[in-house]
Image: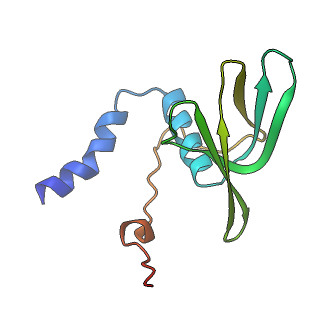
Amino acid sequence: MRKFLALLLLPLALLAGCNDADVASRNLSKAADNFEIQRRVVFYNGITGDYMLSIEGRCAKGNQDAHREVTITCKTGPNAYKKHFLGLSDNVTFFIEQIDGANVSTDHYRVVFKPSVIVPDLDIR
């Protein structure tokens, strides 16, 4: 029971020293990771000055990408997603722009609990 209580109180302890901007930033990132934020992702060639690729929609950047690799996952329908794999080089970079403003709290942090992630859906072959 103590471990459970500690796990519940840990986020509060971590956020106790945060300012409004930190809380809003975390909440925006969490909303984007849940496909709630419209974004534009642009890949740019620094030598030629050209945009190489632009992706727009409810998109999230991969959180565990390998070095010099970027994955962008976009929600395209109620249960439809597309994942893009892109490599970076010395002259190619990218930026992600949030297209619309989002209403997030600066007073409360956000926790998203998804039981389907904890108890996976198994495919038996």
Of residues 26 and 61, which is closer to you in this image? 61
Task: Give residue 40's quadrant in the image.
Answer: top right
* Image vertical order of residue 85 relative to residue 34, above or below: above
Across and down, in percent, residue 72 comes to 65, 46
User: As drawn, which residue projects farthest toward the top?
Assistant: 47
Across and down, in percent, residue 13 comes to 28, 37
Of residues 64 and 98, which is closer to you in this image? 64
The reply, left or right, for residue 22 in relation to residue 55 is left
Numbered-mark total? 0
Across and down, in percent, residue 63 comes to 51, 42
* Rendered-image quadrant of the N terminus: bottom left
* Rendered-image quadrant of the C terminus: bottom left
Visual colour scheme: rainbow
The reply, left or right, for residue 97 in relation to residue 51 is left
| Residue shown at the point (35%, 26%) measured from the top left | 17
* Image vertical order of residue 43 relative to residue 65, above or below: above
| Residue shown at the point (81%, 37%) measured from the top left | 53
| Residue shown at the point (41%, 70%) measured from the top left | 115
Task: Give residue 85's quadrant in the image.
Answer: top right
